[in-house]
């Protein structure tokens, strides 16, 4: 793991919303009552996700980690500056968003 991956993981942790958290940790799709145990766990996470993650039971922490992994997967094909390496059609891009000099296969050709 490098700095950018770690930094992104922390950002993802801060941006998990209630619906996503409750689905991953408790398997529920609707907002529970405000005084329920599940809602209390959510508010604890919302108020300090870093502390919650460190203190959480392993199964709950792994469920949240799966969210982080899922979101981070989408960033694997990015340059260090965060720019995408490929377009939706698979064209390779440089770190400025221009077609890469290494993408020399034209449409319709095989590698």
Image: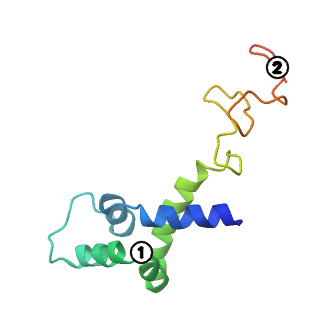
The residue pinned by badge 2 equals 110
| Residue 16 vertical placement versus 45 (above, below) | above
State the CA–CA distance, disc 2 to disc 1: 47 Å
Q: Say the numbered circle drawn on residue 78.
A: none
**Viewer-side residue, 44 vs 64:** 44
Front one among 105 and 58: 105
Indicate left or right for 42 with 103 as reference. left
Residue 15 left/right relative to 4:
left
Residue 83, image x, y percentages: 65, 42
Q: Is residue 29 above or below residue 90?
A: below
Q: Residue at x 75, y 36 (%)?
A: 94
Which of the labelled discs sits on residue 49, or is there none? 1
For the image shown, how many numbered marks are present on the structure?
2
Q: Earlier in the sequence, mark 2 or mark 1?
A: 1
Residue 63: x %, y % from top left: 46, 68
Q: Residue at x 28, y 62 (%)?
A: 28
Using the image as rendered, state which of residue 95 and residue 21 is in the foreground: 95
Q: Residue furthest bottom?
A: 55
Label 1: few (<14), some or many (≥20) within 10 Å? some
Which quadrant would the N terminus be assigned to in this image? bottom right
Q: Quadrant of residue 25?
A: bottom left
């Amino acid at each position: 793991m490098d700095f950018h991956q770690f930094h992104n993981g922390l950002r993802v942790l801060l941006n998990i919303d209630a619906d996503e958290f409750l689905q991953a940790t408790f398997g529920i799709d609707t907002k529970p009552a405000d005084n329920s145990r599940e809602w209390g766990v959510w508010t604890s996470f919302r108020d300090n996700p870093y502390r919650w993650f460190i203190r959480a039971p392993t199964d709950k922490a792994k469920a949240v980690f799966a969210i982080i992994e899922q979101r981070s997967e989408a960033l694997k094909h990015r340059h260090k500056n965060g720019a995408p390496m490929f377009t939706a059609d698979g064209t390779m891009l440089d770190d400025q968003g221009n077609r890469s000099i290494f993408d020399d296969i034209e449409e319709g050709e095989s590698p």
